[in-house]
Amino acid sequence: MAVNLEARKPAPLLPPAVRKFLKQNSQRVFPPIIAIALFLFIWQILCSGPQSNLPSPTQTLSETWELIIDPFFDNGGTDKGLFWQIFASLQRVAIGFSLSAIVGIGLGILIGTNRFMYNALDPLFQVLRTVPPLAWLPISLAAFRDSNPSAIFVIFITAIWPIIINTTVGVQQIPQDYRNVARVLQLSRIEYFFNILFPSTVPYIFTGLKIGVGLSWLAIVAAEMLVGGVGIGFFIWDAWNSSRLSEIILALIYVGVVGLLLDRLVSFIASLVVPEGQR
């Protein structure tokens, strides 16, 4: 009697598509998993003793489980879930960063194409960009008399400098051959802008945007600790005042993940706009 060996083979634990993905991306998937597991193990060892002032991963998880499984609760005022806290911060970042992108790209192109403007404004910009983000907060509070526009201004003034500088450098780095071709073809200023200047500058612009969006997220978390209201920064500060260290750690993890996603979002948009050879 013939035995069907194929029928005796155990069913694969993972679907074929998942196994194929893991096989093709093993070098990208497993090292981060190993690094995270090692980090959690060391954290657990260091913070498990009775003398530790910080909660361990298991303690953090148990004390923040309700926040993790229910991020959408809203009890009014500032008593909201982490989704609404992060969403409020992202709204401020979206407004402030969008304004900085519009103004920064425009100023960068103007300064890059005009030598007089560059010589006049570059020293001023180099001084202002070294001012810490929170140093602008008292000025913005005095000007706007309201916490929300003040926080947005801090984001704007923090993110605009790398956008201006990178855009300016991009304009100045346009090859001279491109300029010569534009003169030979007698391109108008509009044609030169859309066919040569802007396409050549786009990679530099997105470099500035990537730096700017990261600085925006850093600035809003710090600013919200001082201006209050709903937001992940104020959530962290309020948790500190109430000695809820596990909630602070959870919020910091969320802050890091959101910052990574913002960076990846700008990189994804850049991959759609910037030609592959210019990235």
Image (tube, grey):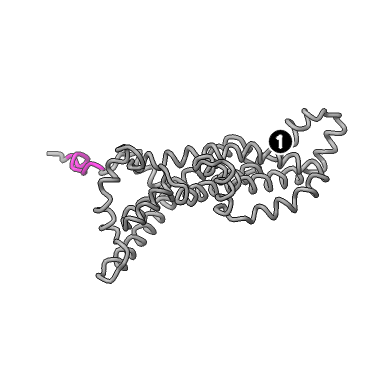
Other residues around mark 1 within 10 Å, as few (<14) / some (14–19) / many (≥20):
some
The amino acid type found where label 1 is placed reads: Phe
Q: Which residues are magenta?
A: 4-12
**Is residue 40 within the magenta segment?**
no
Give coordinates of residue 187: x percent, y percent.
Answer: 83, 29
Q: Label 1: state its secondary structure.
A: helix
Judged from this view, the residue extending furthest toward the bottom is: 51
* 188 lies left or right of 72: right
**Where is the N terminus found, in terms of image quarters?**
top left
Residue positioned 16% across, 41% down in the render = 3
* 102 lies left or right of 117: left
Q: Nearer the viewer, residue 168 or 99?
A: 99
Question: On screen, 137 above or below 3?
Answer: below
Give coordinates of residue 117: x percent, y percent.
Answer: 79, 44
Residue 175 image-quadrant placement? top right
Q: Nearer the viewer, residue 222 or 241?
A: 241
Give coordinates of residue 211: x percent, y percent.
Answer: 58, 48
Q: Nearer the viewer, residue 210 or 271?
A: 210
**Is residue 11 within the magenta segment?**
yes
* 21 lies left or right of 3: right
Give coordinates of residue 95: x percent, y percent.
Answer: 54, 37
Name the residue tied to disc 1.
198
Question: On screen, 260 above or below 105?
Answer: below
Q: How many marks?
A: 1
Q: Nearer the viewer, residue 9 or 191?
A: 191
Residue positioned 77% across, 28% down in the render = 190
